[in-house]
Image (spheres, rainbow, N blue to C red):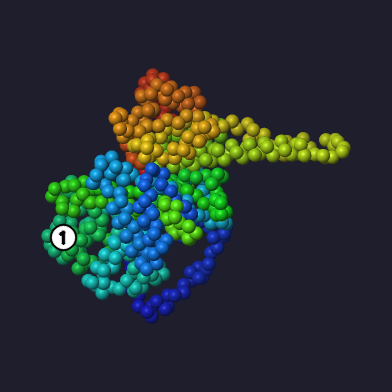
Amino acid sequence: SCQLINDDELHGRERGNSVADNMTVSSGSSGFHYTLNKPYESTILSARYLTKTNTECAKKASELFVNSSSTTDDEKIVEAKNLYNNHFPLATGDEIECTKNGKRVIEMTLSLPDDFTLEYQPGDSVGLIVPNTPEATNFILSMLQKNHGVLPSQKISVDSNHPITVEEAIRTTVDLCSPMKKKRLFMLSQFAADPEEALALRLLSSNEKGNDLFQRYVEDQNRTVIDILKEFPSCQQMITLEGLLGCLPAIPPRYYSVCSSPLADQQDKTGSYHLKVAFSVVDFLTPSVAEDLNSGRRVGGLATRYLECICSPFLNNSSGSTQGPTVQIFPKPTHEFRLPTNMSTPLILIGPGTGIAPFIGFLSHRQAQISSLESFEAAETASEGTWRGGYELDPEDLNLSQNDSTGLNLALDYVRKQQTGEIDLYFGCRYSDHDYLYESELEAFKSTGILSNLYTAFSREHGKEKMYVQNVMQDKPECKQRLTEMILNKNASVYVCGDGNAMGKDVQEAIVNVLADKLESKQSALTYLDQMKTSGRFVLDIWS
């Protein structure tokens, strides 16, 4: 619900009506956590392309943010997007080049509070809150002012919360940029002044006759409420601010896997605590349909295109000493996608594309654990040789019981017994010369022994057969033998992370096929895989 507020009402609401409303809660207070409703304002500390992406456009875009002060932030974002669109065409020119243009992956470093009130572990995700695009926001604000006399600066209370401006409500509370759902289309049809438009919207939202039409017209084309309002203009005349807010859901947060370790990456050179995330920039063309004049459109991700724009100074290494932009974040811990507590457990990590991100965190964490162990033992060795006294101490003079001395060495004894398990990693992408993410880091992990084996698959190599991680797993004899040994003989834990339900199913099918050769039947292999899932030895993190 929403309510426009006049000046008299606003004055009475400027202070909260309860003690809780007027309290200030310190971020260091016991039990305080950052959430979707109370996010942390994080500063972007750095960013880089993980793909072999040309940074000339980032250089031009960065000039908008670093040097330009005569334009608004909205105008800078819009202009930067246009620069990227022009620099990275998706439909004209070489087909392979267009494909690579649409595949841009960024790693972004975000600050964390210095008081450790936002902590994370490898495997966790971070929720990120972004506003609607300037274009969508301005369209709705103009529509409301033209048809209903609602000014952007007017105050409004949404769901009885503290008053905000209409502009802020439209920009930050309702989802203007996601594809429309059937339920929302039906609600919108109630505001259509034109009977034919109302009928068409009801048809699109119907569960029987409208299914195919909805798929081709709305879902395949990623049509948003902005697109629908433009193509069914009679709705603009009738829908009110309250009607619009009632029709649309809240902007959903975007979740990204953490690709760093609190042990290895907690502090940067300036002493700021931070974490890292990696994401693909969503940028694609919708299918072209002859009877749909607005098909074949370029569509960008709300969050990722925005982040690419504001990260431009970092992507081009031209940020200088300027303060980085800020984003609102909150942690999303996981209970399942965790490293085993026992360091000796062997691991099989399967992460094509950006599914590699959490595994970079895993490997960094394991490396930091081993470094800590080595430092521990080095410190003990050093301390054993520091006594320079001229007399000997009798153990009885120390007045320590056997239990005391045992307790003093308990931690070191435990750590010494932790033999680090082998780790195999499977990574896949399209082109080895473009989107082989974290190539140098993975090779470094391999050379230092953190990774035992690194297997790769490339699906678009020129002149070569398409190869995916599941093909490598079940078609290469070396990999088949290794998987069988690791899973059946060494009780390895398997982690699968990536984009797309099909990938997750294909990987599971490949593992079942490999195990079936040793377990005598496919049914036995399926049963074994189910047991692995139940015991936490097979963990999936799949998104679509």
Is residue 57 or residue 350 the one in the foreground? 57
- Considering the image in quadrants, where does the N terminus appear? bottom left
* Badge 1 element: helix
Q: Tell me the quarter of the picture where residue 133 sits.
A: bottom left
| Residue plotted at (47% across, 48% down) | 276
| Residue plotted at (56% across, 35% down) | 342
Q: Is residue 21 left or right of residue 249?
A: right
Are there few (<14), some (14-19), or many (20+) residues within 10 Å of tag 1? many
Q: Is residue 203 left or right of residue 528?
A: left
Judging by the rendered image, the residue that carries numbered circle 1 is 198
Q: Amino acid at mark 1?
A: Ala
Q: Is residue 195 left or right of residue 540?
A: left
| Residue plotted at (15% across, 53% down) | 293
Q: Tell me the quarter of the picture where residue 461 sits.
A: top left
Query: Residue 376, position in %: x, y?
Result: 66, 39
- Residue situated furthest bottom in the rendering: 8
Is residue 299 or residue 210 the one in the foreground? 299
Q: Quick check: can you spot residue 84?
A: yes
Q: Quick check: can you spot residue 523?
A: no
Q: Is residue 415 left or right of residue 71?
A: right
- Considering the image in quadrants, where does the C terminus appear? top left
- Residue situated furthest right in the rendering: 391
| Residue plotted at (28% across, 40% down) | 96
